Amino acid sequence: MERTYLSYLKFMFIAFGTGILSKKMILLLAALHFYGLIPFFQDLYKLLTWPVLILLFMVFYFFVRDLRYINRGAPVTAKEIQDPRIYFSAERTFLSWIRTGISIVIFGFVMEKFDFFLTKLALMMHRVITLHASFSGMSIIFLVLGIINIAVGLGGFMLTVYQVEHGAYHPHHKLYGFYGLSLLVCLSLLSYLLIKLSI
């Protein structure tokens, strides 16, 4: 279940970030007087921001809904502890958390570096490119959420290995609850910043 939801989140956050980069491209194209490409990036911005953000809230809802149906698992037998497939499965899940976290962090850096590029370009060309404060806030949210992904993945992996070695595995509801709360806060902040950006 985790790997599926993490794949959705990674794809949607990259799509949302691409929408924000499209908005920044509009500023760049306007400063360079390439007005012919602006409608394309405006359409891309509209397609990849609010619809994707709504889909992210839906993924959050389904993630929370599915957590209610996960009960405590049966005790892990001694034979299962010896089975390397349990550890391989835990490693695959851990790597999925890491991939998602790194993807979100990298996209946060890309968004921030594009702001830096626009600022330096404006200075070189002696033109004004006004960057909304929301852009910077979105980059920070991406970075924070990516780091939380990595931390939660590491914590979940260590807990899983510990529990399996001690013969009793059960889902990490508190860890999932922390991640769900963090995700909800980040999505709410992104919604707020997107509203400010649209005004």
Image (cartoon, rainbow, N blue to C red):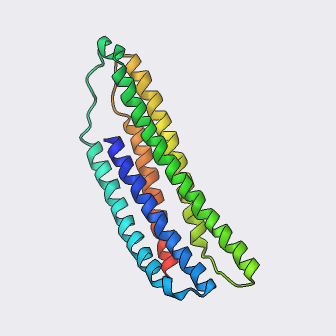
In this orientation, does residue 24 appear? yes
| Residue 25, percent from left and from top | 55, 75
Residue at (68% x, 67% y) in the render: 116
Q: Nearer the viewer, residue 74 or 5?
A: 5
Residue at (62% x, 76% y) in the render: 131
Q: Is residue 62 left or right of residue 16?
A: left
Q: Residue 56, relative to residue 127: is it above or below? A: above
Q: Residue 47, relative to residue 64: is it above or below? A: below
Number of numbered markers: 0
Q: Is residue 87 left or right of residue 62?
A: right
Residue at (44% x, 34% y) in the render: 156
| Residue 1, percent from left and from top | 30, 41
| Residue 39, percent from left and from top | 45, 84
In this orientation, does residue 193 appear? no
Q: Residue 188, relative to residue 199: is it above or below? A: above
Q: Quadrant of residue 174?
A: top left
Q: Nearer the viewer, residue 76 or 101?
A: 101
Residue, far left: 69
Residue, far top: 78
Residue at (31% x, 55% y) in the render: 61
Q: Residue 56, relative to residue 158: is it above or below? A: below
Q: Quadrant of residue 169?
A: top left
Q: Is residue 102 left or right of residue 96?
A: right
Q: Nearer the viewer, residue 70 or 85?
A: 85
Q: Is residue 113 left or right of residue 58?
A: right
| Residue 2, percent from left and from top | 35, 42
